[in-house]
Image: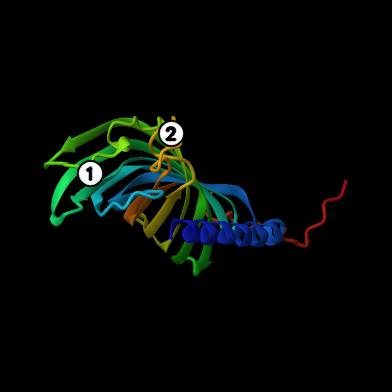
């Protein structure tokens, strides 16, 4: 399933880049539009293992951070973020799927760098986002909840990778008001690198994560948003000055 999402996001990225290249020269903004603000929301995550038969429940947690937007073109822009995210999984007892036996979560500072495409009118825009996301580990928690019996896997003690690379995408809408911009979006990301360190080639060597959720951003325009005053044509008074 994760490979399907990755292929879908990659294909969307190629289409987005192609459209941006075609229209870039026709819709330049001078000066570019710059805005910044804060965001918050809720994400749900899960970690997949290559071959281990693991029944798990996703981990849901709040996310929050700051956002910066730069638009040098009318319909395209760049959105940079720095947010706090938590991902992980809760593992069921394989013999009793009503009982959790293992719980692990990892805390990250996520830095997405997303290309945006805007569709819509001046004060209401549909937004499509796509690009890479870089997660940097800042802490983790793990707990053995129940009797593991024969369920103990090697990844229980494996260390988390200090950095994970994702391919991220999202859709939403942006409302521009005199009080600021309100951007609501749904976001999905699939890791392109392992979440846990891979020192050997065990049956559970691959550990990839998926993250999805919704966020709301409050963004304030900084520069480039006011329309330039139109130049008035020079008036001809009809007077002639002579020596």
Who's the residue at 24% across and 49% down the image?
A: 59
Density class for disc 1 (Cα within 10 Å; few <14, some 14-19, many ≥20) is some
* Location of residue 179 with respect to 104 vertically, above or below: below
Who's the residue at 19% across and 51% down the image?
A: 92
Element type at mark 1 = loop
Left or right position of 187 against 231: left
Quadrant of the snapshot with the N terminus: bottom left
Disc number lying in front (2 or 1): 1
Left or right position of 168 against 241: left
Q: Position of residue 185 (x, y in %)?
A: 38, 59
* Location of residue 212 with respect to 208 vertically, above or below: below
- Residue in front for this viewpoint, 232 or 227: 227
Density class for disc 2 (Cα within 10 Å; few <14, some 14-19, many ≥20) is some
Read off the residue under disc 1. 151
Q: Position of residue 112 (x, y in %)?
A: 46, 44
- Residue in front for this viewpoint, 142 or 101: 101
Residue 181 sits in which quadrant? bottom left
Extreme residue toward the bottom, this view: 121
Extreme residue toward the right, this view: 243
Left or right position of 216 against 174: left
Q: Is residue 3 visible?
A: yes
- Residue in front for this viewpoint, 24 or 132: 132
Q: Position of residue 243 (x, y in %)?
A: 88, 46
- Of labels 2 and 1, earlier in sequence is 1
Q: Which mark is residue 198?
A: 2
Element type at mark 2 = loop
- Residue in front for this viewpoint, 99 or 224: 99
């Amino acid at each position: 399933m994760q490979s399907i999402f990755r292929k879908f996001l990659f294909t969307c990225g190629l289409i987005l880049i192609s459209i941006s290249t075609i229209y870039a020269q026709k819709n330049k903004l001078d000066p570019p539009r710059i805005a910044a603000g804060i965001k918050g929301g809720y994400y749900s995550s899960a970690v997949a293992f290559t071959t281990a038969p693991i029944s798990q429940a996703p981990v849901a947690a709040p996310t929050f951070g700051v956002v910066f937007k730069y638009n040098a073109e009318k319909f395209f822009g760049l959105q940079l973020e720095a947010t706090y995210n938590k991902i992980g999984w809760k593992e069921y007892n394989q013999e009793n799927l009503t009982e959790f036996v293992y719980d692990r979560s990892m805390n990250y500072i996520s830095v997405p760098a997303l290309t945006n495409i805007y569709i819509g009118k001046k004060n209401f825009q549909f937004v499509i986002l796509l690009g890479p996301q870089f997660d940097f580990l800042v802490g983790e928690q793990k707990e053995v909840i129940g009797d593991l019996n024969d369920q103990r896997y090697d990844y229980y003690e494996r260390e988390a990778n200090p950095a994970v690379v994702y391919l991220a995408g999202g859709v939403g809408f942006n409302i521009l008001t005199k009080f600021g911009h309100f951007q609501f979006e749904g976001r999905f990301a699939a890791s392109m690198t392992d979440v846990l360190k891979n020192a050997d080639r065990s049956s559970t060597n691959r550990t990839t994560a998926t993250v999805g959720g919704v966020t709301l951003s409050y963004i304030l325009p900084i520069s480039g948003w006011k329309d330039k005053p139109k130049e008035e044509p020079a008036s001809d008074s009809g007077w002639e000055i002579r020596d």
